[in-house]
Image (cartoon, grey):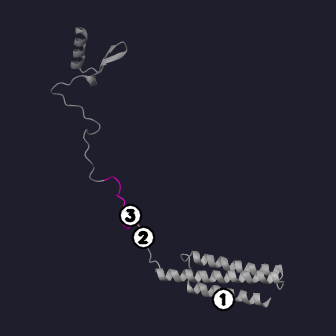
């Protein structure tokens, strides 16, 4: 043991980077040796106590309140109610015309082919009404109702003529 201590001391004082080996395992290396009082400690690759950063290395995101667009003005409850009422009126007229067509086919005043042609026109009007209602929060505007009423009037004249 005294020999190992003497060799270790000699190697440390000589600044040797060789480490002592015992059964293929290093006993002690130069980086594990106790430094002398005059030697400076080896600097660490990172600080031991890292303070919280004062500035982030990336831009901070904006708060959601300023990033989102302002909501658009929504129609009043009364306006929405009127739009839904107009939608309901047009739907009732379409249903009434379908019943008239079915009654005329049953009575024999209309053939099935004529009834199918009138029904096809009603379906186009109904599809347009649904598209208009979908784009207007479930209701239809006065201008849309006037357009649909005109189409329904034309279709009603066709039903009467046949």
- Of badges 1 and 3, nearer the viewer stands 1
Q: Nearer the viewer, residue 53 or 162?
A: 162
Q: Residues within 10 Å of mark 1 (few under 14, many from 20)?
A: few
Task: Pinpoint residue 89: horizontal percent, then vertical percent.
Answer: 61, 83
Disc on res. 122? none
The residue drawn where x is 72% and y is 80% is: 98
Question: What is the secondary structure assignment of the residue under circle 3?
Answer: helix
Instruction: Say which quarter of the image contains residue 23.
Output: top left
Left or right position of 11 against 84 = left
Quadrant where the image shows the N terminus: top left
The residue beneath circle 2 is 69
Where residue 38 sits in the image (x, y, percent)?
A: 15, 27
Q: Residue at x 24, y 32 (%)?
A: 42
Q: Quadrant of the C terminus?
A: bottom right
- According to the picture, the residue beneath numbered tag 1 turns out to be 150
Magenta: main secondary structure equals loop
Q: What's the CA distance linking mark 2 and mark 3?
A: 10 Å
- In the image, is residue 62 part of the stretch drawn in magenta? yes
Which quarter of the figure has residue 131? bottom right
**Which comes sooner in the sequence, label 1 or label 3?**
3
Seen at 76% across and 90% down, the residue is 160
Report the Cα–Cα distance between label 1 and label 3.
47 Å
Q: Earlier in the sequence, mark 1 or mark 2?
A: 2
Question: Where residue 114 sits in the image (x, y, percent)?
Answer: 81, 82
Report the side of 154 relative to 42 (left or right): right
For the point 56% across and 83% down, the residue is 141
**Magenta-colored span:** 56-67
Q: Residues within 10 Å of mark 3 (few under 14, many from 20)?
A: few
Residue designated by label 3: 64
Q: How many marks?
A: 3
- For the residues labelled 2 and 3, say whether their Cβ atoms are less than 8 Å apart: no
């Amino acid at each position: 043991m005294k020999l190992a201590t003497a060799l270790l001391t000699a190697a440390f004082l000589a600044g040797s980077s060789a480490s002592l080996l015992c059964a293929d395992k290093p006993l002690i290396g130069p980086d594990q040796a106790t430094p002398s009082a005059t030697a400076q400690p080896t600097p660490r690759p990172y600080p031991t106590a890292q303070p919280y950063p004062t500035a982030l290395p990336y831009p901070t995101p904006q708060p959601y309140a300023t990033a989102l667009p302002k909501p658009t003005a929504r129609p009043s409850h009364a306006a929405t109610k009127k739009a839904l009422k107009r939608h309901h009126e047009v739907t009732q007229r379409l249903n009434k015309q379908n019943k008239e067509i079915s009654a005329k086919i049953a009575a024999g005043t209309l053939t099935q082919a004529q009834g199918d042609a009138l029904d096809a026109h009603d379906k186009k009007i109904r599809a347009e009404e649904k598209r208009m209602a979908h784009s207007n929060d479930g209701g239809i505007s006065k201008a849309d109702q006037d357009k649909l009423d005109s189409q329904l009037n034309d279709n009603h004249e066709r039903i009467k003529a046949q």
